Image (cartoon, rainbow, N blue to C red):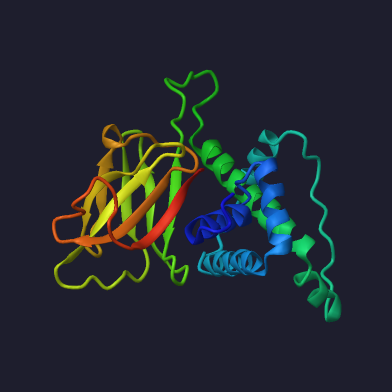
Amino acid sequence: MNTQDPNERTAEAGEYVLGTLNAAERQAFEAAMARDEGLRREAYAWQDRLLGLTRRLQPVAVSPELWARIAARLSGVSQVVATPARSGAANDALWSSVQFWRWLSGGAVAAAMVMSVLLVRTLVAPPAGVEQAQVEAPRYLAVLQSPDNAATGWIVETVGTDAIRLVQVGEGATIPQGKTMQFWTKPEGAAGPTSLGLVKPGQVVVVPKGQLPGLAERTLFELTLEPAGGSPYNKPSGPILFVGKAVRL
């Protein structure tokens, strides 16, 4: 990883906390984090933001029948053992433990994502004996954050199998008069970015996949501040307002 690039540091820290890095990337990030206090702060900030998001979710009661269906589909998991909670200093030590946070970010979050996908597939699975017409297309999500304060402003999500959608989900940047936002993408390994058009604050932008140079894990998306009418070059000319990389769901 390029730990000198602020945007790369932020994106990599988010992927580490989400548990989407492969084994080699994860080891390299942890080695860099061990000697870089700023990188550790990036990871801790991501943990705080993601925990804040979970607090916004409303609990949903799951019926015993649905749990039974989920359990029947899970292989290699015989039982879940509940451990009594500890209090006082023991809990403080747990929450300050690096190993605990690694488990939480790399294990629990990843497991929750897998469980969510499994649950959706369970609910929409065809009846026994009915063959599915096609394999489900990959789904991707990119969370675009400000490189200045790491605030989440926009997300990019796949829409069915035919398009991606850019949606504002947080406080947007102030766009000065005579300026505009421009939407860009760059698949990993591509020679340069591709413009996906101009964007107004609050606008929902849908881009057909045929207009994308590619869409895969770690595809970069960003919004930059450009002159009215867009960048005069075939690449961003202004500062990055929001940036993020796609993860596969």
Q: Position of residue 103 (x, y in %)?
A: 74, 56
Residue drawn 18% across the image and 66% down it: 179
Residue drawn 62% across the image and 69% down it: 38
Q: Position of residue 247 (x, y in %)?
A: 50, 45
Q: Nearer the viewer, residue 86 or 15?
A: 15
Q: Up-down: is 46 above or below 135?
A: below
- Write down the quadrant of residue 207 in the picture: top left
- Write down the quadrant of residue 66 in the picture: top right
Decide if residue 153 is on the left or right side of residue 71: left
Q: Position of residue 173 (x, y in %)?
A: 31, 70
- Which residue is at the far bottom? 88
Q: Up-down: is 212 above or below 15?
A: above
State the count of labels. Answer: 0
Q: Up-down: is 123 above or below 7?
A: above
Q: Nearer the viewer, residue 53 or 198?
A: 198
Q: Position of residue 73 (x, y in %)?
A: 66, 34
- Write down the quadrant of residue 191 in the picture: top left
Q: Up-down: is 19 above or below 149?
A: above
